[in-house]
Image: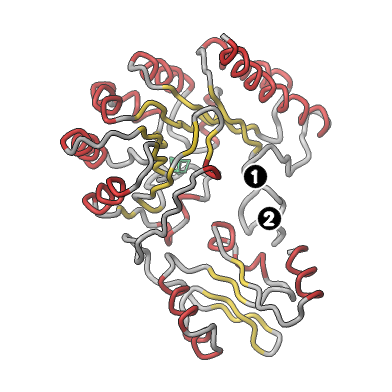
Amino acid sequence: LKISAKLKKKFPGLFIIVGGNNAELNWTLYYSKSIDLIYHDNGLKTFDALIKASFSREAVKSASGVCYKENGKWVENAKGEAICEFEFEPLRLTDYKKTNLYSLGSFALVKGSWSCPHKCSFCCCRKMNNGKYTLINLESLLCEIEKIAHDKIFLVDDDFFADKTRSEEFCKAILDRNIKKQFIAYARADFICENYDMLPLVKSAGFSNILVGLEAINDDILKSFSKQTTKEINEKCVRNLRENNIDCICSFIVTPDFTRKNFNDLKFFIKRNKIQRYLISPLVPFDSQINGKIKSKRLDGIAINFKPKNMTKVEYFIRLCIFYARLFINYALKRGK
Ligand code: SF4
């Protein structure tokens, strides 16, 4: 918003539009003088129509899922239906440098579903697409993957394995069609535990890494997140993947009430379970319930957007940095071998 205000000051005629995940869920946070249009619709069909109409007043007024100003007041048009297909063929770049996953190389991003059928309390992904879990036609997904001239694919579905039958079909089709790619995708720890028999198929289809939101190593915290998993499930998940030569990239959430003991327990959990790759994210107050204010500039890094309860913000930040320092030192040592 600060940047849009600066731009508006310098170029008063500029038409400024905001969109993306946060705008899609919390559009009122962007009700600002410097913003002209907020795009919060599902999919890009409406946006395409607006471009074709050069954002004319009539087109904006009749578009679904947009907010615009009229006589200085914001008008909110309701969202359209949830989507289950892309309306456009993705405009593929051939240079994937920007989608480089540290130490794993660059990946082409592909999306096969919207939203998620699970209900973890901290998660905003499940609220996307009108909170409706929809899947792209499997054949379209496979065709898109076949067309990509890159050997590494990141399936960015919020939970690629949420539909077991479909993920099994996907893996079998990859093998039948002799598609030779390296895949990375998100899965849940309970899925990995309940479907041990499927893991050899997953591995042979090309999944050498799976991202799992373990989130916490404490059953009470997991319960408070409505994660429907336990510490035991998390440990079993890491073990199951390792036994199948699949690298588990674990993500954890640290909460404002984290104590020194919580940080130490997490450190020992990572060590004991020989977790080589991990992400640690401070919990982000993400809802519009947060007094109508955006609390975060960055939602993906280690920006801390709250006042820690049990230590100073500086100590909390240093403790987080130590986790990442350990991670990078381990990579460097491995590379040096
Ligand atoms: S399983 Fe993952 S994507 Fe689904 S609601 Fe939970 S955290 Fe969100």
Disc 1 versus disc 2: nearer the observer: 1
Image point (48%, 50%), residue name = 125
Q: Quadrant of the N terminus?
A: bottom right
User: With 183 as the anchor, is 128 left or right in this view?
Assistant: right
The picture places residue 319, in percent across and down from the top left corner, at 74, 24
Assign a secondary structure to mark 2: loop
Left or right of 71: which side holds 226?
left
| Residue 127 coordinates in the image, percent (x, y) | 47, 55
Amino acid type for the residue under numbered disc 1: Val
Q: Secondary structure at mark 1?
A: loop
Which amino acid lies under the numbered mark 2 shown in the image of this protein?
Answer: Ile
Query: Within 10 angstroms of label 1, few (less than 14), some, or many (20 or more) residues?
Result: many
Q: Nearer the viewer, residue 137 or 97?
A: 97
Q: Residue furthest left?
A: 176
Up/down of 203 relative to 185, above or below: above
Label located before the other in sequence (1 or 2): 1
Q: Residue at x 76, y 77 (%)?
A: 11
Residue hosting label 2: 290
Against 107, residue 292 (above or below) is below
Q: How many marks?
A: 2
Query: Residue at the spot x=35%, y=53% of the render?
Result: 133
Side of 114 relative to 256 (left or right): left
Locate ligand 1 by image quadrant: top left
Q: Quadrant of the C terminus?
A: top right
Q: Which residue is mark 1?
A: 284
Residue 12 shows in this picture: yes
Residue 221 in sight in this render: no
Instruction: Identify the coloring.
Output: secondary structure
